[in-house]
Structure formats: structure tokens, C-alpha cells
Image (cartoon, coloured by chain):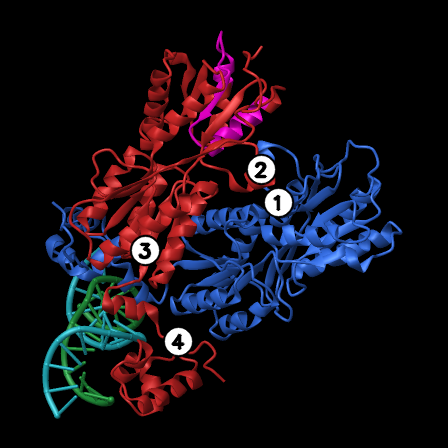
Chain colours: A red, B blue, C green, D cyan
Amino acid sequence: MPGSGLKITVREVARRAGVSPMTVSRVVNGGSGVSEQTRRRVEVAIADLGYIPNRLASNFRRERTGIVALIVPDLSDPFFMLVVAGAEEVARRSEYRLFICNTRSDPAREADYVDEMLAGRVEGVLIAPVSDRTRPHLTRLTQKGVPFVLVDRAVDGVEADLVQGDSVAGARELVQHLVKLGHKRIGLIVESSEVSTARDRLAGYLEGLLVCGIEVSEELIVEATANIQGGRDGVERLLGLPEPPTAVLAVNNLVAVGVAQELRTRGLRVPEDMALVCFDDVDLASQLDPFLTVMAQPAETFGRIAMQLLLERAAGDAPARRRRVVLPADLIVRRSCGSQLPAPTAVK
Amino acid sequence: MPGSGLKITVREVARRAGVSPMTVSRVVNGGSGVSEQTRRRVEVAIADLGYIPNRLASNFRRERTGIVALIVPDLSDPFFMLVVAGAEEVARRSEYRLFICNTRSDPAREADYVDEMLAGRVEGVLIAPVSDRTRPHLTRLTQKGVPFVLVDRAVDGVEADLVQGDSVAGARELVQHLVKLGHKRIGLIVESSEVSTARDRLAGYLEGLLVCGIEVSEELIVEATANIQGGRDGVERLLGLPEPPTAVLAVNNLVAVGVAQELRTRGLRVPEDMALVCFDDVDLASQLDPFLTVMAQPAETFGRIAMQLLLERAAGDAPARRRRVVLPADLIVRRSCGSQLPAPTAVK
DNA sequence: CTGTTAGCGCTTTCAT
DNA sequence: ATGAAAGCGCTAACAG
């Protein structure tokens, strides 16, 4: 019976197999450079003793953990969930383990996680940063020589590999789509301009209006947190306007959910009373009922590509200069934009 | 400027501060037993050098990682996502890091993860097992003396702390609710009876029918995988019956989404043509549009309590005998069950 | 193909 | 309150 909780080390195994600890180590790590016969003996000893190599010792000795960190602002957001899935798949294929860190959009928590990963000697960090305030944390990574790749969001003043969506084009297209449906007053709910996607989507929104020859109304652009509550707050402010918009572009899926919720609470219908579109799909919801018109980003691909770039860097075979991958987003037209409705009227 | 990538160890810091490595170690680990003055000197040295303690070495030496694993079958399932959130919160408060493992309901992957965690010397494992086939993996944990707690699902023949929902009562109530709405032919889509929740929900379903004086029709009970595809397959089989059900009870949220999808594809309406209820909410979807009638389980609480039990075990101050926590589920009536509709008619 | 030697960075233990 | 010595389990580096 295997050693129930007892500490079996290479030495025990070596003694039992009648070889040196080094040979045991070799067998454990692939077994190359060991004769078929010896290897078998060692393997038997390992099985007999129920030996499990102490990865703590191994990691320590080799200064290699085989762990990469994935830091995201919100794990409960289906978008980031997909990023995780993609990244995990690639990491796994390369025999890396993924340490997932959920910052909940809290810069302090993010800082903690970065420090923990630094202390834990992870071999690389894939990060969807909270905002530009993430910069100092990234600087620490650079100082310690830990490679990192940004995903979804850029950070002002940080030169690093980056995988992101084309937010400018995406927002522009959403606006154009709404205008085509007859909307002239289009509200935008964005998060803080400290977040690159918010900046880009605002830029795309403005571009879209410009292209369509519609004048910008400052009051239609409201800033809120990028979550459900933010959506509720944002649309509340828009509805409080003397002349509310007839359509809302939400900076992301969670905000859109909040908007829908608040409108429902007030007895307003989407899209009849207010059209609604956003970035990023809410996959389960959309599969249950294809309702939200969205600019869908290939989140899983974000994760896959970003992890690939990261592992290349970790392996040391990546070009010195930063790489930037911009993936196009796809407009998925469903009901919330009111595509099959007649021209909109103002919210009464 | 901090040592850019260079290796700073306790020794360097000690030299710079004019103390012994031991003192540095003491300062790093809470600083008790060190005079205020020396501590300050050491802290300055640490800051000057940009010293980051090598947790690899520390872990190795103390034989303590401060890491617990959380193994779940499906991270993209909102239910498990909430379990993760709850567990993470508690782990964090106790200064433990959480290593999240997504098995994707693949027993092989689950086995891999268990082995990895064993090798990585995690201090405990919180696991929502794939099925009864998980038993050998759990046995390995026991052999190595690694404490674990089961969450959401029991494993046949495994005695361990367990936090789960009251699936029997939940399913019974769902059936009773449907019967009250006039349904007599109620389909059940469950997963393999190797999963404890599936067994329990089937039992509850049968109990519900019994209580309501409705005879069981074997053909209304179909087995499918517990995901979206399973829902589609399951309802397809139910619709192929000579006399299809008028309502479906899905074993979980993902299955319900699949059912809804398949029905839509076929031009059937929920709840008019087919009522639909399930276990576990799909929070974002429900927030976007409160449609699905569900038996909601307090998933986050599952995670919190389970992690508490686990940390107690890891700390060694838990009773020898196993603890079993059963949390009640809540019926949330929304539209998919057809509560506000007249009595149902068979799907034509 | 196999073994020997040495030491990773930290902390436990025992002095002082 | 501080330090000296020793060693955790493993694996580079080098012999043989």
C-alpha cells in the first residue's frame, strides 16, 4: 500500500530501485538518457512507494514554475470567461498551468495579484488591465523581467504585445446601423476614459455620427461603471434629459443588461420605446433568446492568440518589438435594435 | 533603481541592512520579534533593492504553499461561476490563493488536475466532481492526506464534507408547480445517473408525480449530457414521442437553454407550446429578461461554506466525522412555466 | 548510461 | 532581539 501521507523522496525510490537519485529524477522528467531496463525498475519503485515528485522542490531548483497568470477584471463577464477559455486551451497544450486572477476591476486587488504572481515566480502574465492605472503594476513586471501581454485593453504609455478588438470601427458601425434604422438621437454609455476600449468606442461613436452627418449632443454621452449598475445609472440619466435619445449604445454587454433592466422597471419596451445595442455578446442569454443586437468580438480568439504571444515571449523566441493584433468585430443584428420595426419615435 | 531582473536574495538584503538573513526573513514574515529600529533598516534595504521574496524557496522550505484548488466541471456555467466567486472570497480573506481548474466534465482532465494539485502540494481541494467516476481521484487525495470538500455533488462511496442543494425537494416542487398549472405529462431531461444531482432530481421528479397522483411514464424521462447540446437532444427525443409532454423539467440551466433553442428552431413557443422549468438560474439572461422559471440554488453560498469547511480541515481544526450541509433551493416563477396562461394543451 | 557533488533561497532550530 | 548552522528535495554540472 502506498505511503499514506508519508514523505517519499527521490532517495527512497532510488534506494528501492537500486539506483541513484539522479536516475530517478531523469525517469520522472521524461526518462531520456536512461536504459529501458533501469527505467522500468525505477517506475516499479515509484508505483510501489506511491511516490509523487515534490514540485515545490523541483520548481525551486529549476527556477521554473510552468505557471502563467491570467488577470481579468471580471470573471463573471461572459466576454472574459471566453478569453479565459481560449487562453487556457493554449496554455494547456504547451504544458503550462494557468493561474486565474479576478481583479473585480479593483486596481488595488490587481496590484496585489501582480505582486503575488511576481513572488510566485510565474513565467508570464496575460492581463486585461483594469485601466491606465494599471501602468505601475506593469512596470514592476518589466523591471523583474516577467513577460506580459495585454488583452482587450491597451494601457496608455505601455509598449507591450497587445491583442484587442477594433473598437473604433465597431462603435462606428453600431452607430451607422442605428442611424440607418432612423435614429438621430443616440445615447452612449461608456466607462471612464481611463479604459482604452471606452476611449476607442467613444471615438468610434463620434466618427459614426460624423459620417452620418449627425451633430454630437454632449448630453447624450454619459459615463458610468462598466457593469449592470452602470447601465441602470446611465440610462436613468439619459431618460432624465429634456429630449432623451431613441437609442442607446452600451459600452459592453453588462451595461446593456443594466439598461434593459432599468427600462423594464420603468415599463419601457425595447426596442419600441428605446433601441439598444452593445459590444460583446451575452452568449447564454442570446442562446436562450436572440434578443440583443451586438457587436460581437471573438473573445476566445483573443485569449488564444494572446496566450500564444505570451508563451513565445516566455520561451524567449519572440521579436524584441511589440506586436499588436487587432481583430474585427461582427455586427449581429437581433431584435433589440428594432430592425424590423418602423422608424422610431421619441420616448414619451 | 531596483535590481532589474537580477536575483536579490535575503543575503543581499541582509548585507545591505547590516543584519543576518534570518532577521530579514523575520521582517518579511510579519516582523514579530524584531526591534522597531532594525525592522525599519531592513525595510529600507528591501525597498532599495526591490527585493521580492522567492516564494518558491519559501514554499519549499516550509512545505506550505498557501494554495487551495477549486475543481469545477464547467466554468462557463453561471452556477459554477458563482461557486467560484464565493469560494474565492473566503479563500482570499484567509490569505489563501485559489487555483481554479476547469475539467469541462472530462474525467481524464479531472484526473490530470488532481495529480497536478497533488504534485503542486496544494493544501486542500474543493471539488465539484464530474461524477461517481471521480472516486479514484478522491481516494488519491485521501491517501496523500490532502483534505477535500465536495460541493454540489456527492460521490458514491466517498465520505467527505459536502455542501449541496436539496435536489430532491427542488425537483419535487418544480413538478408540483407544473401540475398545479395543469400539466400531466411532464418530461424530464437528466444527465447520467452517475451524477448525484441527476439521481436526486430524478428521485424528486418521481416523488412529485407520486404526490400529485400522476402515473410515471418511463418514456418521458430522457438522459442527455448536462449542457446545451444535451438540452437540444433531449427535447428532440421528447418531441418525437407519440404523445409528447406539455412541460419539460431540465436538470440544469444549460440544458434548459438548449431546450429553448431547439424549440425555437422548430417554431414552438415557450410556454404556449411547451412549458419549461429547470434547476439553477442563468443570471445574466434572467436579468436581461426574466423569462425562465427556475429552482434557484444559492451557488455563491455553496462556494463560501464549502471553502470554510475546507480551510478548517486544512488548518486541522475540523471534526473527524464528515459534515454535510444541505441548502434549500428557491422556486422563482417567471414566464417559461406559463403561470399566467390558461391550462396547457398538448404540442400539436 | 549512470553516479557524485554541490547548492538553489529560505527558514527551523538552537544558541547567544 | 539577533545570529549561526543545517538542510528541505531536487537537479545542474560534471565525472566516469
In the drawing, does residue A222 fall left or right of residue A33? right
Q: Chain of mark 4?
A: A
Q: Residue furthest top?
A: A242
Amino acid beneath label 2: Ala
Contact check, label 3 and label 4, Cβ < 8 Å: no
Q: Position of residue D8 (x, y in %)?
A: 30, 74
Q: Chain of mark 1?
A: B
Point out the tag, 3 or 4, that comes first from the N-terminus: 4
Marks 1 and 4, how far apart in space?
42 Å
| Magenta segment includes A241 | yes
Q: Chain of mark 2?
A: B
Q: Chain of mark 3?
A: A
Q: Position of residue B313 (x, y in %)?
A: 51, 62
Where residue B285 is drawn, which disc sits there? 2
**Magenta region:** A236-263
Q: Position of residue A226 (x, y in %)?
A: 43, 31
In the drawing, does residue B52 fall left or right of residue B169? left
Q: Between label 3 and label 1, give the one nearer the viewer.
A: 1
Q: Between label 3 and label 4, give the one nearer the viewer.
A: 3
In depth, the one of A309 and B114 nearer the eye is A309
Task: Give the structural element (helix, strand or loop) at label 1.
Answer: helix
| Magenta segment includes A85 | no
Compared with A233, B79 (above or below) is below
Compared with D7, A259 (above or below) is above
Where residue A68 is drawn, which disc sits there? 3
Where residue A52 is drawn, which disc sits there? 4
Amino acid beneath label 3: Val
Asked whether the viewer can see residue B31, the reply is no
